[in-house]
Amino acid sequence: MSGERTIPTCPQSEFALLAAIIAEPANLPLAVDAGVKPACFTTQEHAHVWGALVALFDAGKAIDGLSLQSLLTERNACAGQEYELLQTAVDDANIWRHKFGEALDDVLKASRKRQVLRAAARAQDEIYGGDNPADVTARFADATGDTGLNGPKALDAHDLISAYPALRPYLVDGVVRLGETMNLIASPKIGKTWLLMGLLLAIATGGQWLGRQCTQGRVLLIDNELHPETLAARLKVAADALGVSLNTLGEAFTVVACRGKAMDLGQMRRLFRGHGQYAAIAIDALYRAMPPDTEENKNEDVRRCYNLIDTYAGETGAAFFLVHHSSKGNQSEKSVTDVGSGAGALSRAADVHCIIRPHETENCAVMDFRTRSSAQPPPIGLRWDYPLWRVDDTLDVAALATAPTRKRKPEAAADVPPGYMAVVAVADAEPRPLGWFAARACAGKEHAARSLLRQAVAVGALHCWSGAKTREPDRWATVPQPSGFRV
């Protein structure tokens, strides 16, 4: 090879990578996970900006041009190229955010080349200095492998078994272990959140979940679907039903209500940094936590999401529970791993794929599992007993509902106009107010909704729940109001 040899650098790609992160802060944890570190930048200005980005992220502060400029100024590092980078990233955000992937690859490749060259130069000096070739080779391998950029080291079978003599301990006996990922899949409005709350309360107290013993540990619930008021009300109802005092839980049960705050998987990292802080981390729901430009029907996009979750599981040692919805239509004829809206990678990437499908008996369901590190648990029959799902061993777990669950008009009510089915179709086990039905079934007309609700109650298709006070408005649900319970 002729010509002058130069150290591999790519300052333009470094600039593009930093600009893409400033334009889309959710890219920062992805860059960290990929192995980006200060040594990846070849100019002092770029290293300054990278350090400021990481500092803001670690402190849980917003990443924007103003915050960066303020922090760089405090560090006496906001002049020249740093300022130009900030202005360019902010002014042309839509352009830079789409260059993240390409810029990341370029920066990592150049950094890797520099690392190998430095290790090779040291190895050459050591060989000329008379060091043992085997020792030089081992040091070269260590120097080029300990970066997080080229994957785990190879172990022979004996070393592997010696390093990992036992399986990870169970968090939920026979189902999921610490550090594993479990999907919780069911159709919308079937009661997934109630099921999840029962699971997390069992872990926080060291109790049982659907007949399986849980190891006690701290839990973190990240909920992006419910408003905090609704979340608080549900949690209290679920805890009361289980006989759990929220006052005694203390820090064993932590909740982050982030509906309306647009927190995706990349941004969640700061909520659970550190190993051993939590035994269980639940995200309800997964589809709302996917990063921008992610499509749940693309295997590559779903794979990246689960790779990020696996990274978090490795860092925290916690089991991750991901609540997701099933696809539309009848699920009874599908295999267990085919239930779940989106790409096939959804079920393949998880360690446990847990699904809930309607049973042919009203207010009942069947739970099925597919596990990676455990014997396959048998299907479980469940019966809805507001506000909890409870095991019902009398159910035939093979008798799945063969059509979408809808209330059929009783034969005794053949003379009743079928219009009331409009409110029955949108109802579920949770008591809903008049306005809720009017908005979803009657174009906002409350007088029409009230008429249809009366008809539905008359034929037994819905049940009216009375308020705690005389003036408290009634609510309606598909299940009867528990004795002594008032909404």
Image (cartoon, helix red, strand yellow):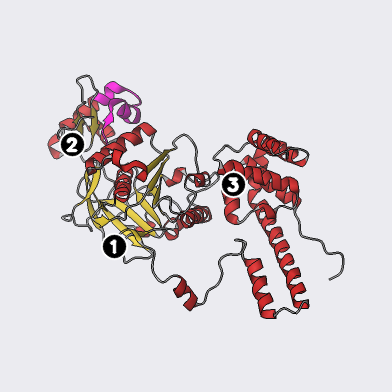
**Label 2 element class:** loop
Residue designated by label 3: 27
- Identify residue type, mark 1: Pro
* Residue 253, label in figure: none
C-alpha separation, residue under disc 2 versus residue under disc 3 = 48 Å
- The location of residue 2, given as percent across then percent down, is 86, 69
Q: Amino acid at mark 3?
A: Asn
Q: Which mark, residue 480?
A: 2
Viewed as shown, does residue 268 lie left or right of 417? right
Estimate the spatial distance between the alpha carbons at disc 1 and disc 3, rounded to whole Å.
Answer: 38 Å
Instruction: Give the class, few, some or many, for how many residues have Cα within 10 Å of label 3's Cα (few <14, many ≥20).
Output: many
Q: What residue is pinned by disc 1?
A: 377
**Span of residues in magenta:** 428-450
> Are the residues flagged by discs 2 and 3 in contact, CB closer than 8 Å?
no
Label 1 vs 2, first from the N-terminus: 1
Asked whether the viewer can see residue 340, the reply is: no
Magenta run includes residue 317:
no
